[in-house]
Image (tube, grey):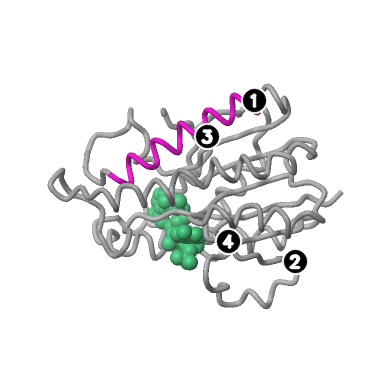
Amino acid sequence: MTTNVLIVGGSGGIGWAMCRQLAQLPEIQVFATYRSTLPRGSEDYERISWFQLDVMEQAHYPMLVERLSEVVHLDWLINCVGALSINERMPEKSLKSVDSEQFIDAIRINTLPTLLLAQHFQPFLRKAHSPLFATISARVGSITDNGLGGWYSYRCSKAALNMALKNISIEWGRLMPRSCTVALHPGTTDTSLSKPFQARVPEHKLFSTDKTARLLIKVLQSLDRSNNGQFLAYDGSLIEW
Ligand SMILES: NC(=O)c1ccc[n+]([C@@H]2O[C@H](COP(=O)([O-])OP(=O)(O)OC[C@H]3O[C@@H](n4cnc5c(N)ncnc54)[C@H](OP(=O)(O)O)[C@@H]3O)[C@@H](O)[C@H]2O)c1
């Protein structure tokens, strides 16, 4: 039976690598969203169907539901959307750079979409045998792990995302007992998001998007309901919330 996968943010560095690799696996149909432009090379992958979605536009969610209405069920929904520098503002080094608009936009990009996706796609996931719902978070969203400080908007939006995922895992654990909802940390990956911050990252700790996608897909394939409500790194290790 075909596994239906929806990748939200399929045009981003990690999202596009996930789409490419999933589309090469047998028995998988990939549905993917992009915000403004399709990724280069998308025309080479017949098994990826593309849909436009700006996650900051609430009206786009029911439109996407409508366009996917012929898909009977979704087995996996993976949200790969995220932003660190917002509106050309770099992440804050200290309190004096905190800006309301930057903070609220971080929540609108990094946190709220996961709640809206869960709300709108619950009926699709409910029809799957073992539904899997994951969002790419970031280790810096862990309150326990925070030893460095800084990056107020990004850290807060990812910590709030983690709480959203934990809450969804509890609600869906009751509603869909075979479901699994997780937060994922991809490791530092060479994408446009991390480009300005790569100078001090040792070479062996900077993953290519292909490597990150391969590792995350391996983690996702290993999950079952016993992993529901976990925060997992690219190597499958648990991260404290
Ligand atoms: N790269 C890392 O080292 C790293 C580390 C930890 C966590 N992460 C997380 O990994 C996830 C993927 O990031 P990435 O590294 O692949 O970065 P990326 O290449 O910049 O991809 C981010 C994606 O988010 C999309 N996006 C941003 N705002 C959007 C909106 N309003 N509507 C729809 N899409 C929107 C971007 O679309 P456009 O292309 O249209 O802008 C892009 O597809 C993010 O959640 C990030 O926080 C990354």
CB contact under 8 Å: marks 4 and 3: no
- Direction from residue 7 to residue 98 in the image, left or right: left
Res 226 label: 1
- Residue 20 point in image, percent of width and height: 63, 64
Q: How packed is label 4: few (under 14 Cα within 10 Å), some, or many (20 or more)?
A: many
* Quarter-of-image position of residue 173: top right
In the image, what residue type sits under mark 4? Answer: Leu
Is-magenta flag for residue 162?
yes
Name the residue located 68 percent from the left edge and 22 percent from the top edge: 174
Q: Secondary structure at mark 3?
A: helix
Dot 3 or dot 2: first in sequence order is 2
- Residue 145 point in image, percent of width and height: 32, 32
Dot 2 or dot 4: first in sequence order is 2
Q: Give the spatial CA distance, label 3 vs label 2.
A: 29 Å
Q: Is residue 100 above or below residue 209?
A: above
Q: Is residue 165 above or below residue 73?
A: above
In the image, what residue type sits under mark 3? Answer: Leu
Q: Is mark 4 within 8 Å of ligand 1?
A: yes
Looking at the image, is mark 1 or mark 4 nearer the viewer?
4
Query: Which residue is the site of mark 4?
Result: 53
Query: Which residue is the site of mark 2?
Result: 47
Looking at the image, is mark 3 or mark 2 nearer the viewer?
3
Name the residue located 71 percent from the left edge and 59 percent from the top edge: 30
Q: In the image as oriented, which residue stretches furthest toward the front?
A: 59
Query: Which residue is the site of mark 3?
Result: 165
Q: Secondary structure at mark 1?
A: helix
Q: Give the spatial CA distance, label 1 vs label 4.
A: 32 Å
Per the rendered image, the range of residues in magenta is 153-172
Q: Secondary structure at mark 4?
A: loop
In the image, what residue type sits under mark 1? Answer: Ser
* Quarter-of-image position of residue 149: top left
